[in-house]
Image: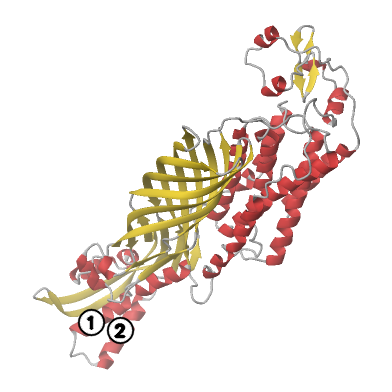
Amino acid sequence: MKNYLILFLMMLSASVTAFAGEVAFDDVATPSDTLTSDAEAAIPFGLPDSLTAHSTMPIIDGQPAFYAFGRAEENPSRVSATSFKKKFFSMESNPGVKPYRFMDDMTFVGVPLFIAGIAIKGEKASFRQNYNDELHPNTRLITKFKTKIDDYTQYFGPAMTVGLKLGGYEGRSTWPRLLATAAMSYGTMAILVNSIKYTASEMRPDGSTANSWPSGHTATSFVGATILHKEYGLTRSPWFSVLGYGVATATGVMRVLNNRHWVSDVLSGAGIGILSGELGYALSDVFFKGRGLLRNDLLHENEKPSFFSISMGVGLGGKSMEFGPQDLRYELDQYDFATNFKMKAKFRAATTVDAEGAYFFNKYVGVGGRFRVRAMSIKSWSDFVEQSRQSKISLINDLAFIIRATNPTMSDAEYEAKIASLRGNLAGIVKNEQVNIVSDHLTEFSASVGMFFNLPLSKRFSLGTKALIGRSMTQELDINAQFSGDIKDVGYVMEVTDGQPTRLDITHCNSTGETYNLEWDYITLGGNNTTTFGTGLSLTYRYKSNFLWKVFIDYDYTRKDYTLTYDPYRHLKYATPNLESLYYALGTEMEPYEFIIKKDTHFFTIGASFAVNF
């Protein structure tokens, strides 16, 4: 909230002068003193588009004048403080710039994004983290992905816009109009985001605060991206828009990976950000009309639908995996588990981000490629961990079972006394037990190439499809355990007949006076690299000659070998080192177990894209 208020007040205080009236230019060359071809050739690095587009580049003493904040001067050293001040606060438009009408530039693309966030809010109901509760007191989420970059990238749009303008690179608006527009955009966003946040009171996925939906960082980032898009993407180069919305998308993804937001928070935040930015410019068109405009929108006359796009979507499908003894890599390991043993991993809807592009040979057929990142968070991970912890072999119960089985003549009283003594002597081998979810995302990276097809429906709308083939790799989910305790010296006598233990007796169990502190990979889940096939259907809306919005549904298929590695005994090697030979003799090698399943995965992705036509 504080960041929004500071940003809003800075923009507002700087923009109030926009309503104070226009200031006349002084020492401006006449339109007749325009740049000749000889003078243009004398410029070593060419002439910016902004100066040739309007044919208003002035000539002073036969040389091209320098531009300082849109103002012609004979030399930058002649720019006085007074003339700079006048020009900075000027609302004069360049000749020939067409004024915008109210709502003339609204796309309303933010509305479906916001609604999409609402539509998948129910997904989080089945993903409740358990923080220090009675059921899972030693389970916590500590993801490896931790970054504060998103705290800064949310301001990329305004920083880029102001930097370009300070550098004398003319955009759509004069300083007063730009600052007033930005103030209205950020003000609208702050009101919408905070009124919803503190009314909905949605808990964050990390359990820290109840103000998760919608994402303020994402909304802030998309407001800035929309400002950069309007000021420079529409008037200078579409790649400014791609850069702005690309960074904004990355900001939203980092909020999810940082475990600070749900996917629904990010989608709704992006929708609010785009809508607020567009409303800010629409209000400026009402207040300022044709004042304070410096450049017209670019025109793109290429009829081929070649494009480059940045997409964000929600992935559905492939949401559960189940592992049992029959899936163990080594058949002999099956005897270490009950026949009904199951480890089941369930996943939430995936966060999907794409970069896609294609070159079209004509209106209908082209070739291109797509790079996709799909991250699926494990659902109810604390239950998943607890399930595995309950199935691990307890040292006390293990030894008690073997002693009972190999000493059938031992009386119940004698047996109970021996086990009680053993339990007391082994107390302290695990004093602290912590299970940490280091990476709760199963992330898939895929790169594909193929054919793209386009069917024009009208001047603005078209349908598209594609047929892709590529390779997919998976980054594993990682759950670590951290145990500490006393190291024990346990002595035993075991009789073996025909390779089978016939008697086991624990002779002593003494403390060594030493301790251990161990952290290891308790459970990992990953997949192999495979071939992936993809297709999809998209509806494209051309809202400018070279800017497109798309909604799409994609389908991807791959067949993977998923491997779950389960290592519950590692701490016993350190806590009771001389019992390792006993476990080997009993057929338990105290090595990690590997479960492998083959799974046909069918993924559906629903999302939206911002694209440039080139």
In this rendered view, identify the residue nearer to me: 325 or 449: 449
User: What residue lies at 62% left-to-right and 54% top-to-bottom?
Assistant: 113
Say which element carries label 2.
helix
Task: Please name the residue that numbered disc 1 is placed on.
Answer: 403
Image location (x, y in percent) of residue 602: 40, 58
Task: Give the class, few, some or many, for how many residues have Cα within 10 Å of label 1's Cα (few <14, many ≥20).
Answer: many
Q: Which mark is residue 419?
A: 2
User: What residue lies at 65% left-to-right and 65% top-to-bottom?
Assistant: 210
Image location (x, y in percent) of residue 160: 67, 35
Q: Quadrant of the N terminus?
A: bottom right
Q: In the rendered image, is residue 92 in sight?
A: yes
User: What residue lies at 26% left-to-right and 90% top-to-bottom?
Assistant: 414
Q: Is 299 on the left-hand or right-hand side of 429?
A: right
Q: In which quarter of the image is the C terminus?
A: top right
Q: Is 6 on the left-hand or right-hand side of 392?
A: right
Q: Give the quadrant of residue 515.
A: bottom left
Say which element carries label 1.
helix
Q: How far is mark 1 from mark 2, CA to CA?
A: 9 Å
Instruction: Classify 385 as above or below 507.
Output: above
In this rendered view, identify the residue nearer to me: 22 or 486: 22
Task: Give the class, few, some or many, for how many residues have Cα within 10 Å of label 2's Cα (few <14, many ≥20).
Answer: some
Q: Give the quadrant of residue 330.
A: bottom left
- Amino acid type, callout 2: Ile
- Amino acid type, callout 1: Ile
In contact (CB < 8 Å): disc 1 and disc 2: yes
Image location (x, y in percent) of residue 52: 70, 19
Q: Give the quadrant of residue 561.
A: bottom left
